[in-house]
Amino acid sequence: MDAFRETPLASEEFLRCTVVLLLIKFVSDLARDKSVLKTEDWRPVWHELVVPPELSWDELRSRSGDSSLVLLDRYLREIYQCNKNLLGHDSGFFQFDHALSRSMGHIQGKVLDRASEIDLRPSRFSNMDDLYGLIERLLLRFAFRMGAYGPEYYVPNSLSTLLAKLMAPQPGEDILDPACGSGFLLTSLAKQAGLSCGKILGQDRGGSTVHLCRINMLFQGIKASRLELADPLTSPMLSAPGELLKADVIVGNPPFGLRFDKQYMYGRPELFMCGLGPRSRSEYMYLAHMLQVAREGRGRIGIIIPHGVLFGKEGEAFRKWLVESNLIVAVIDLPPKLFHNTKIPVAILIIDKGKKRNDYLFIDASRVFEAEGRLNKLPDREAQKIVEIFGSYADLSGFSCCVNLNAIRSLGYQLSVPLYVEPRSKEELPQDIDEISEEIRKIEEELAMVQEEIGQSVRRLDSNFDVIARRSLPHRRRSGKKSAP
């Protein structure tokens, strides 16, 4: 991982190039490893990845001088053409700007040198999860530098694994993530199903994240059925003209706290169901969309949401409809600071269109975490405890509680976990619900503003860098004129 730390990753073109170079390195290492890799560790989709001998990593390294930039561009284009069925139909991700790359020639060579130090042969790892973890950290580092700052981009491994176990996808079931980011949730669910699930479907409104999702899944031996760069709220996946594509398991970590105007949402009147309005929070709108595409009678939904969605006047009619329709299975509070770029605590909301019970499970896991630097991590033992309680609907003092419909009605359809799970001590008693709602609303508004400012700053920096890089190129002298002294 440290091999890239000193490399000045600065432009999106360079980062795209680097990620694809890692794919070339991985496929080349796979080819070297095929004869010794255990059968159970080999993934069928790896058979479909093609890197001709003349495009191998060793061949690229043998010609990695400053004169190899045109060759490098050809590598990217030809690798894409050989694997178009796996890499999607947008070839732009697999090209880079010649002028910018010429000005960064020394950096390209450094990356080739550093990447050569990374041995990605699966047989070198005693556990395939160690290989996946290495690739995950590399992709995460690159993607953050590409401006993918939102928590919807990356779901921490401990959280994605927990959600996969809670959803328990079965062989043959179709899985959909309408805010797939770089695909860590999708890969966790596919692996939970033993790589024998049905269709793997994803959408994302972000730019390069869908391509990173596709490459991430290839690294982990998973073949996506459909990945689309589109806003699921305005351009949802269709199985036929005018017919929404349905799935059995729908998961998502949608953008936090966005607002949409009425004109933006034109054409999806079904999303304004049960009290939702055109200016409703994005989390409600995504959940309404997920309810629309979950198969009737058996569709299951697992969505990661900030606490502000669970209470307050906004969304009360929508929550009432969810409760009275007996769709909610569980609400699980999680610790704060799980994500790289926000301290906001989140919760998991589990919904089942085939629910048969008449009670509701609330789990308070907000205090069970381990600190890792500036972030918190949900320990494996606590995650397993959540899964076991979820499966048994057990009451555990200070941790979980099953309540009936009347209990939720009496609290005005508020779904905040501390209202139902008795705190362990008086000091842990919650504040007034309206005070909490107002505090979280202000924090989330500030977060949205900060994220937008960061995105604008990154775009300005990248633009300035490109201008500086182009100006640094030697200009062609006009014939018959001498350059100024």
Image (spheres, helix red, strand yellow):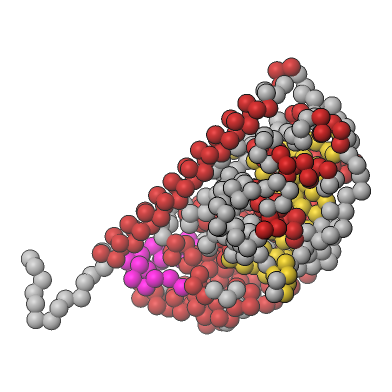
* Magenta span dominant secondary structure: helix
| Image quadrant in which the C terminus is located | bottom left
Rendered location of residue 377, percent (x, y): 66, 39
Rendered location of residue 323, percent (x, y): 81, 42
Residue stretch in magenta: 95-115
**Rendered image quadrant of residue 226:** bottom right
Rendered location of residue 343, percent (x, y): 58, 37
**Rendered image quadrant of residue 52:** bottom right
Residue drawn at point x = 52 percent, y = 43 percent: 448
Q: Is residue 268 left or right of residue 480?
A: right
Up-down relation of residue 15 to residue 326 (above or below)? below
User: Magenta segment: does it hold 288?
Assistant: no
Residue drawn at point x = 26 percent, y = 64 percent: 472
Q: Is residue 304 visible?
A: no
Residue drawn at point x = 70 percent, y = 74 percent: 241
Q: Is residue 477 left or right of residue 46?
A: left
